[in-house]
Image (cartoon, rainbow, N blue to C red):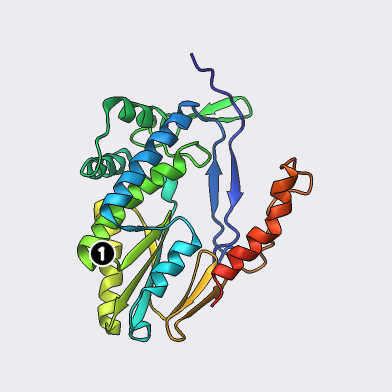
Amino acid sequence: MECLAKPNAFITLKDHKGNFTNNPKCRLINPAKSELGKVSKVLLDNINRKVRDSSKVNQWHNTDEVVEWFENIEDKKSCIFVQFDIEEFYPSISRSLLDKAIFHAMNYTSISNDTLQAILHSRKSLLFTDHQTWVKKSDDPEFDVTMGSYDGAELCELVGLFILHSLTETYGDNACGLYRDDGLCCFHNITSSAADKIRKDITSLFKETFDLKITIKTNLKIVDFLDVTLNLESESYKPYSKPNSSPVYINTQSNHPPNIIKRIPSMIGKNQQNIIK
């Protein structure tokens, strides 16, 4: 029988968000997690890959994939971007939303009962702090998608595939893409009023279908997405970094193998070269 470790939960501040001084936000990190999450991670990753390959939706994993999508946009100067961010994505995923995402995935691949049980068992969690035990306050306290779990990112990707399916049904196969909780869409030859209707429709879709809140911006010609700035007017892109960010790749006291440390400068240079045009 697994013995659950009891490290203290903690919060981190979202000080990179706008208006942080007046409206501070934080995220809850729970390092107490079931080891079965390692199994769930592998199972979910396999499911996501099969769904992604079959459905052909734009679920991005890195900047290169975003840049490739941008380069394939035709007649860029006649387009506008719509950018959205899912608020508190991890803790906002409900059992009902996960069930819908799993049901959608079953259209592309078989999912055994044992796999379902592993995924759902990994959702059970407890919070520990100062030798006290806490449970999430919700309608289903035994269900949670915690930040810090082994399979949290993969589960968010599974839900993201369901979200992208709904968006592509409405706006077309290649109009929208998603990286975890960050979304980006591109539309050709639309007016300001049409863009505002899209904003309202997408907001309503997330609220009514997924029970998720989003922040959304429309009529954009230039966007900062992941670590790249995309410009429709100049049809170009360039590296982007958040204000006051100080990139740290590995700790100076790291025990990484020497050959890995030696290759880091060339890997960084290659990454920057790929997103400069």
Estimate the x, y position of residue 113 in percent, counting from the top left: 27, 26
- Percent across and percent down for residue 27 are 53, 48
Residue 207 visible here: no
Q: Is residue 98 left or right of residue 220?
A: left
Residue that extends furthest to the top in the rendered view of this protein? 1
Q: Nearer the viewer, residue 251 or 5?
A: 251
Q: Residues within 10 Å of mark 1 (few under 14, many from 20)?
A: some
On screen, 113 above or below 78? above
Is 82 on the left-hand or right-hand side of 270?
A: left
Q: Residue furthest right?
A: 253
Q: Quadrant of residue 202?
A: bottom left
Residue 124 visible, this orientation: yes
Asked whether 4 or 108 is in front, the reply is 108
Q: Residue at x 34, y 81 (%)?
A: 79
In the picture of the structure, the residue carrying the numbered disc 1 is 173
For image coordinates 37% across by 27% down, the residue present is: 118
| Residue type for callout 1 | Asp
Left or right: 6 as drawn, with respect to 208:
right
- Badge 1 element: loop
Residue found 34% across the figure and 73% down from its top: 186
Vertical relation: 112 (above or below) 213? above
**Percent coordinates x, y for residue 253 in the rendering:** 79, 44
Q: How many marks?
A: 1
Find residue 16 and report its image quarter.
Answer: bottom right
Q: Nearer the viewer, residue 125 or 176?
A: 176
Q: Nearer the viewer, residue 90 or 2?
A: 2
Percent of width and height locating residue 223? 47, 74
